[in-house]
Amino acid sequence: MTKLVYTGLNAGYSDPVRVVGGNGVFYHLSDGRHVIDASNTGGPLGHAHPVMVETIARTAAIAPAINEGWFWAEREQAAEELIDIAFGDEQSWVGGVRFFLSGSEANDAALSFAQALTGRVALATRERAYHGMTGLARNMTVQPHWHGGLSVSGGGTLPVPQTIPVRILPAPASASYLNGTDAAAPDLRHAAELLSDTAATIIDYSQGGIYYDSEYQDNVAKAARSAGSLWVADEVVTGLGRSGRWFAFQGAESRPDIVTIGKPLAGGAMPAGAVVFSKAVLERVKGMSWQTYSTFRGHPLMVAAIRSYLRVVRDDALLAHVASLEILARRRLIEIAQRHPSVRRVDGRGLHWTVELHGADWRNWRADQRKLPIASKVAAAALDAGVMIGTSGEQASLFLAPPLIIEPPQLELIFEALDDALKVADIELEAMSSVSTAA
């Protein structure tokens, strides 16, 4: 029995898949198989990318062990390159960067910064949001199954009590394919009133399989600014290439007060996070010192990996590559969904897609059931076909997020495996319908 205290990405009780290595877009498993990594937002360049391997080896040999409390020129250079490369034409409003250990920590720090600046305590997010598991980020994670507490096998939960008031905006309604009742467009007419006492409004772009449209972003930004609430764009998943552009927020006209970055920032070679402030926000704290500190933030290996990843995305034209694959992904996933009655909804951007199955309402899912969820059964069938697909702990949703370097033939293998694996969900849906009819 493993001594590791472990929570699987795919919910339910089954023997864990043992990954022992990886190369390119493939995981290497302990049973000798090489399977395609189809759900890994933290590995944008896949595994053992030669540029990242060389960067880490070279840096480890020469870099000092220097903590965040000492000024280090390479750290400053990384901040400048992040703004110069990733923000490009956006530099007119971007003010500065601070590095963190993860996206969760970046979100926590950004939100506590907003509380200090505004003097307010309450914070706001959208329905089905996930912002991390650290401090205020956990408070703002309102997906019910990621409550940060304990799920009791067989039913029941021991969630962590909320420590702050949290305002929840309705989520955007979007679908590339829908087989069922269409969700109503979100009513944001009273959003400014809801946000009136909040320090910050943090909105992510993909969690719960819910993706942005430009109108929703601009309306939230307008309401937040009207309420004096700092707008934080959580780009931990979608930033730095995943959405087919540098940032998901670039799909609309509004621009955030703060941007948080995480998973892909160091190219999968190191953990990393960042908070990017607008010039307007930094002007408000001119003459002040942000009294937060951590030993390993901006670690030399992290900084070197960040700089290398930014250059790879730019030099290898990965944004255009992902944008072209989005067209293929949308077409193929809609074709697959139309063949499977178990699929309720498909949506996504760039190389992040969600396939939502018919099943129990997500609001009732607390990851507290011993029975293997239908999404995990589909993921297991896909693995048998050579593709590792994640459910993000969901009961009836699968997410696809392969490395940005994936090529069309490898992407087709993912779709073929998914197409075959969805037969499992079709059979279960038919069985459920038969039981319901008989009752």
Image (cartoon, rainbow, N blue to C red):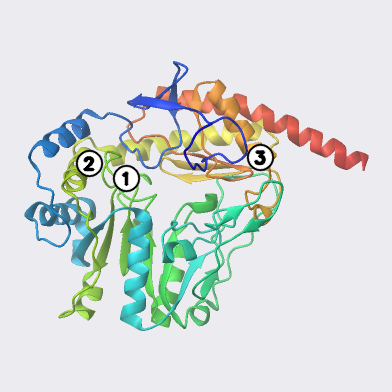
Task: Please report whichever mark, 3 or 1, sits nearer to the chain's N-terminal start.
Answer: 1
Residue tagged 1? 264
Q: Amino acid at mark 1?
A: Pro
Please state which of residues 438 and 347 is positioned toward the viewer in this rendering: 438
Judged from this view, the residue extending furthest toward the right is: 439
Q: Name the secondary structure under disc 3.
A: loop
Mark 2 nearby-residue class (10 Å; few <14, some 14–19, many ≥20): many
Picture coordinates of residue 129 (x, y %)?
A: 51, 59
Q: Quadrant of residue 324?
A: top left
Residue tagged 2? 309
Q: Amino acid at mark 3?
A: Pro
Residue tagged 3? 373
Judged from this view, the residue extending furthest toward the top is: 32
Of badges 3 and 1, the one in the foreground is 3
Residue 419 visible (yes or no): no
Picture coordinates of residue 408 (x, y %)?
A: 40, 26
Task: Please report whichever mark, 3 or 2, sits nearer to the chain's N-terminal start.
Answer: 2
Q: Is 231 situated left or right of 74 in this image?
A: right
Quadrant where the image shows the N terminus: top right
Q: Name the secondary structure under disc 1.
A: loop
Picture coordinates of residue 186 (x, y %)?
A: 58, 66
Tell me: residue 132, above or below residue 426: below
Q: Amino acid at mark 2?
A: Tyr
